[in-house]
Image (tube, grey):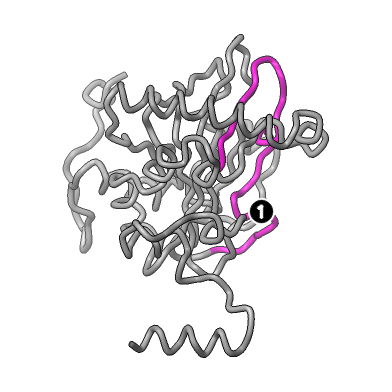
Amino acid sequence: MSNVERFIPSESYGLLDRTQEGSAVDQAAEQVRHLGYALLDAGYAPEELQRISDAFDSTRHAYVEAYGESRLRSLDEFYTVRSLLVQPVGREVFLALALNPNLMSVLKQLIQGKFILNQQNGIVNPPQEGYNQSAWHRDLPYQHFLSSTPLAINALFCVDDFTFDNGATFVLPASHKASPFPSRAYVERNAVQIEAKAGSFILLDCMMFHAGGFNKTSAARRAVNHVFNIPYFKQQINLPSSIDGAGLSAEAREILGFGYVEPPSTGAYLSSRESRKS
């Protein structure tokens, strides 16, 4: 049913403050603040999406070859590719994806001050099989506190269409505003499954509970997960140690964490302070 058929009121009174209409980026940021999730078009042409798709498959194949299928399965890591942007295959594609301009614009609205890339992982939802993202969780796990503004944002890039049949992500709207995980009855009444086209980012406040759905189809559903957070959280894997930052802009270096690596000694700490003053 359309908005017209539902007769949503357009008039209002008694308001002292109101958010103005804005761009698609503004609208996505507004929805994340209120509901904890939103969709954002990454702005890629079909040929660019194909390049990302091909790079995903090539990188995953090389990753499994490098670390071994039996080892990855024993660690429940077979359907995850850690730190795509530092892998030998496809690193330029995934570095550009992590720095996507539309994504950067919305992150600058949502996270106050500086933010860094905590992680970028390839995620495969296998057909007819459970996987480790199918349980309800926050992307700041084991935490049950509230923050007035986001401390971290998840940007899940859809390499494939996310559909009800292939295990599109479930969310609990506005659960980033409550500390405990809700009751089973609440979850069953209020869980929402998000369909999204390939080339979209599913944006989540990292304190919102979410879970991958069960893939009922015969094909894997692929995604690239990003977590961006304030610099007070450690990166999942130390990215600056594996990236040549020489050709990167100052902003890109900052987002990738080059200015936030822990000094190994007191002398190194003092030297870092001196370099900031110069």
The residue nearer to you, when weighing 171 against 130, is: 130
Magenta span dominant secondary structure = loop
Examine the rendered structure and indicate whether residue 92 appears above or below residue 58: below
> Please, which residue is most extreme toward the top here?
218
The image shows residue 105 at horizontal and vertical percentages of 29, 52
- Quarter of the picture containing the C terminus is bottom left
- Confirm whether residue 17 shows in the render: yes
Query: What residue is shown with label 1?
Result: 141
Q: Which residues are magenta?
A: 121-146
> Is 122 colored magenta in this rendering?
yes
Element type at mark 1: loop
Residue neighbourhood size for the residue with mark 1, other residues' Cα within 10 Å, grouped as few (<14), some (14–19), many (≥20): few
In this picture, residue 223 sits left or right of residue 16: right
Examine the rendered structure and indicate whether residue 36 appears above or below residue 16: above
The image shows residue 83 at horizontal and vertical percentages of 56, 46
Q: Residue at x 61, y 9 (%)?
A: 218
The image shows residue 134 at horizontal and vertical percentages of 67, 32
- Confirm whether residue 177 shows in the render: no
Q: Residue at x 55, y 55 (%)?
A: 242
> Is 130 colored magenta in this rendering?
yes
Q: Residue at x 64, y 35 (%)?
A: 80
In this picture, residue 62 sits left or right of residue 93: right
- Quarter of the picture containing the N terminus is top left
The residue nearer to you, when weighing 268 against 104, is: 268
The residue nearer to you, when weighing 129 against 144, is: 129
